[in-house]
Amino acid sequence: MIWYPYEQMKTMTPPYEIVDAEGVYLYTKERRLIDSISSWWSVIHGYKHPVLTEAIRSQAERFSHVMLGGLTHEPVQKLSAKLEEWLPGDLDCCFFSDSGSVAVEVALKIALQYFINRGEKKRTKILALEHAYHGDTFKAMEAGDDEDYHFILKACAPRRQVMHIPARTEALEEAFRQYHDHLCCFLAEPLLQGAGGMRMYDLSFLLRARELCDQYGVLLIFDEVATGFGRTGNRFVSDLVLPDILVLGKALTGGYIGHAVTVARRKVFAAFYDDCPEHALMHGPTFMGNALACSAALASIRLFEEEDYMSRIRRIEAVTRRELKGFSDPRIREIRIMGACVCMEVNDSAALKGYQRFAFERGVFSRPFLNYLYAMVPYIITEEELVQVLDTMKAWFA
Ligand SMILES: *Cc1c(COP(=O)(O)O)cnc(C)c1O
């Protein structure tokens, strides 16, 4: 049997069985559904895109995978070269892994060891945000701030290495003032906190974080697993504020194959690069740099550039604002829009009960969680399809 994610298996509603998918559409045996959440925010080009399919097919005809231990290959070399050129500043040193959670683990490991390698043994604490989500592995879970995990963390009783603050400048300044000697890094989902409830905050907070990190020699880590590749209306938030370590996942391969990357700036890499074997980074996921994933990622980035995705994303945002202008309901606490992300936060999660079925009947796949009804559509969506998604959300409250 299949053990499904985030579900009480005894009471879960059975999942929809997908038999085909193309463009923004998922197909069950009886229905065609717009995927309004891009398969957990990853399938930015939609399904069965001929360019991505061809990239994977042609690489599979050579080899699908070889390990990176003692071996290397063209797709991984090309992808790291592309990222080096494409990402801002000197974010140049790419460590690949198979999922966002692992890439976050790697980022934290790099931050901790960066100071160990430099002989600064006191810097072991991690500063992170309230309502953060960084993945489901143990350290990622600890760096996150999701109540669903707290009982697990309690059960294994770790000495909390992570401090959480609200995304407010005063709290940030206070934390740095008090703990700067002990901090190795400040980790954040920049501008948009996804799984924590599509919470949005201001760029000025990140600019101040950059200043404080510089002032106190703390590494700034951006987890752009969800926000990267245009979702916030910026190509990367890192284009606006340069972090020391950047984590990408989800849309990296256009959502075609699970893969992620932790990208470090030159000065971070330099702390590992010397004659001492103990200063090496001891990590190596079996499937890191998978050739199919790298080929898909290269094709995905090429599409993103050549087909001017940033203007598509601006259009998605403009249509969303137009369609939701003046819309309100007593059950809705707030409507938030940023780039190609829209969220209706309700006062009581009961107000969303039954929405998934309601949307299904109107040809939309959606998966609200807690108090959040949201859409993160594939960027290839047409205006008409987007309006259908937004109309469905509005109709629920009618
Ligand atoms: C999804 C997500 C992760 C975890 O990625 P997985 O590939 O599911 O392990 C980490 N950080 C953020 C911000 C995410 O949205």
Image (cartoon, rainbow, N blue to C red):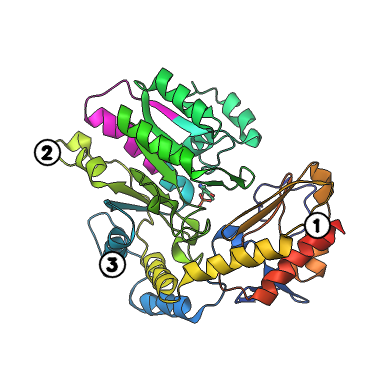
Few, some or many residues within 10 Å of mark 2 (<14, 14–19, 20+) = few
Please determine whether, in this image, residue 226 is positioned above or below residue 162.
Answer: below
Few, some or many residues within 10 Å of mark 1 (<14, 14–19, 20+) = some
Q: Are marks 2 and 3 in contact (CB under 8 Å)?
A: no
Q: Report whether 384 appears left or right of 270.
A: right
State which tag comes first along the sequence, 1 or 3.
3
**Mark 2 highlights which residue?**
275
Please determine whether, in this image, residue 119 is positioned above or below residue 296.
Answer: above
Identify the magenta region. Answer: 105-126
Give residue 170's position: percent from left, percent from top. 50, 27
Q: Is residue 110 magenta?
A: yes
Residue sticking out furthest to the right: 398
At horizontal 48% and vertical 59% (from top left) the residue drawn is 258
Residue sticking out furthest to the top: 178
Few, some or many residues within 10 Å of mark 3 (<14, 14–19, 20+) = some
**Mark 1 highlights which residue?**
355
Disc 2 marks which amino acid? Asp
Please determine whether, in this image, residue 138 is positioned above or below residue 259.
Answer: above
Q: Which quarter of the figure is the N terminus placed in?
A: bottom right
Disc 1 marks which amino acid? Tyr
Residue 78 badge? 3
Count the marks: how many? 3
